[in-house]
Amino acid sequence: MNGQEFERRIRRLGRRRGVTVSFDPTQGKGSHGRLYYGSRFTTLKDRRQEIGPGLLKAILDQLGLSREDLES
């Protein structure tokens, strides 16, 4: 899954759960930006590149989500 697909799934999940989701490209260097999910946030790298399994788990942990949340 690349960063764009991840952001799309997080936005869809946020709409279903009534959680505010936003992306701020100014809160990162280069192609990085900050993704907010309610009061939690994480940094997303280049959204065109694939997110590895370890990084995906770390991002989900920072947002307080699980892999199953994305797949539902």
Image (cartoon, rainbow, N blue to C red):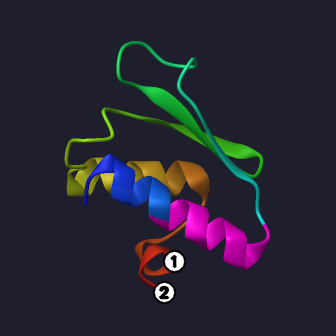
Determine which of the numbered discs, if any, sits on residue 14 in the image: none
Q: Are marks 1 and 2 in contact (CB under 8 Å)?
A: yes
Residue sitting at x 23%, y 57%: 53
Image location of residue 7, percent across then percent down: 47, 54
Query: Predominant secondary structure in magenta?
Result: helix
> Dot 1 lies on which element?
helix
Q: Quadrant of the N terminus?
A: bottom left
Q: Which residue is mark 2?
A: 72
Residue sitting at x 53%, y 25%: 25
Hey, which residue is sitting farthest bottom in the picture?
Answer: 72
Question: What amino acid is found at the position of numbered circle 1 in the picture?
Answer: Asp
Above or below, 1 against 4 in this view is below
Report the magenta residues as a range: 9-18
Image location of residue 47, percent across then percent down: 33, 40
Mark 1 to mark 2 CA distance (whole Å): 6 Å
Residue 20 among magenta residues: no
Q: Which residue is mark 1?
A: 69
Residue 14 among magenta residues: yes
